[in-house]
Image (tube, rainbow, N blue to C red):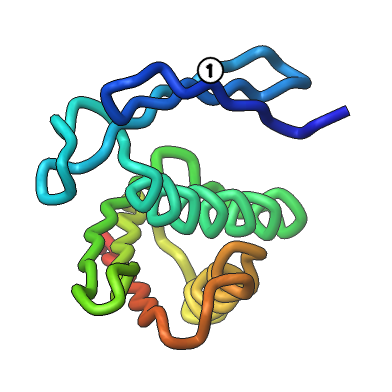
Amino acid sequence: MATATGTYLGDLRVELRHEQSGATIMTDAPVDNHGKGEAFSPTDMVGAALGACAMTIIGIYAQAHNVDVSGMKMEMTKTMNADPRRIGKLEVTFIMPKRAYSDKEKASIERAARTCPVHLSLHPDTEQVFTFLWQE
């Protein structure tokens, strides 16, 4: 069974379906590439996947070490390169909830983020910048 399926709807839009859950996501081409920008572009999804994957790995670390990271937030900024058109840079900022994290916990959380499968799967020419904002 396929992990995901897609249907081209026309007008540069694709509906994706996660086969196990039935969840769907719509994509649209970005405004700077002939689209309307009314949904995630495929490259937006790559950046969002990087942030979500890192947060998930942080969550796995947190569960295993009894560290509360609930309420953690993420902001992602994507920069495209022109020739060839591809993702040039993904900047992910993690806004950590106000808690008394030890220096060891902070270092472990930051290290965990960099072990996420999406981070490790992206081409080395795609710059990835992770920033952590610790609310003291």
The answer to which quarter of the image holds residue 89 is bottom left
Rendered view: 28 above or below 26 = below
Q: Amino acid at mark 1?
A: Thr
In the visual, does 15 lie left or right of 43? right
Q: Quadrant of the N terminus?
A: top right
Foreground residue, 13 or 40? 13
Q: Dot 1 lies on which element?
A: strand
The answer to which quarter of the image holds residue 78 is bottom left
Foreground residue, 46 or 81? 81
Q: Residue at x 54, y 72 (%)?
A: 122
Rendered view: 39 above or below 117 = above
Rendered view: 80 above or below 60 = below
Q: Which residue lies most toward the right here?
A: 1
Count up the numbered dots: 1
Q: Percent position (x, y) of residue 83?
A: 24, 79
Q: Which residue lies most toward the bottom here?
A: 125
**Circle 1 is placed at which residue position?**
24
Q: Residue at x 53, y 17 (%)?
A: 24
Q: Residue at x 60, y 49 (%)?
A: 56
Q: Quadrant of the C terminus?
A: bottom left
Q: Which residue lies most toward the top here?
A: 22
Q: Percent position (x, y) of residue 21?
A: 71, 16
Foreground residue, 64 or 20? 20
Q: Percent position (x, y) of residue 13?
A: 34, 26
Q: Percent position (x, y) of residue 14?
A: 43, 26
Q: Residue at x 34, y 77 (%)?
A: 129
Mark 1 Cα within 10 Å, few/some/many (few <14, many 20+)?
Answer: few
In the visual, does 59 lie left or right of 12? right
Foreground residue, 113 or 125? 125
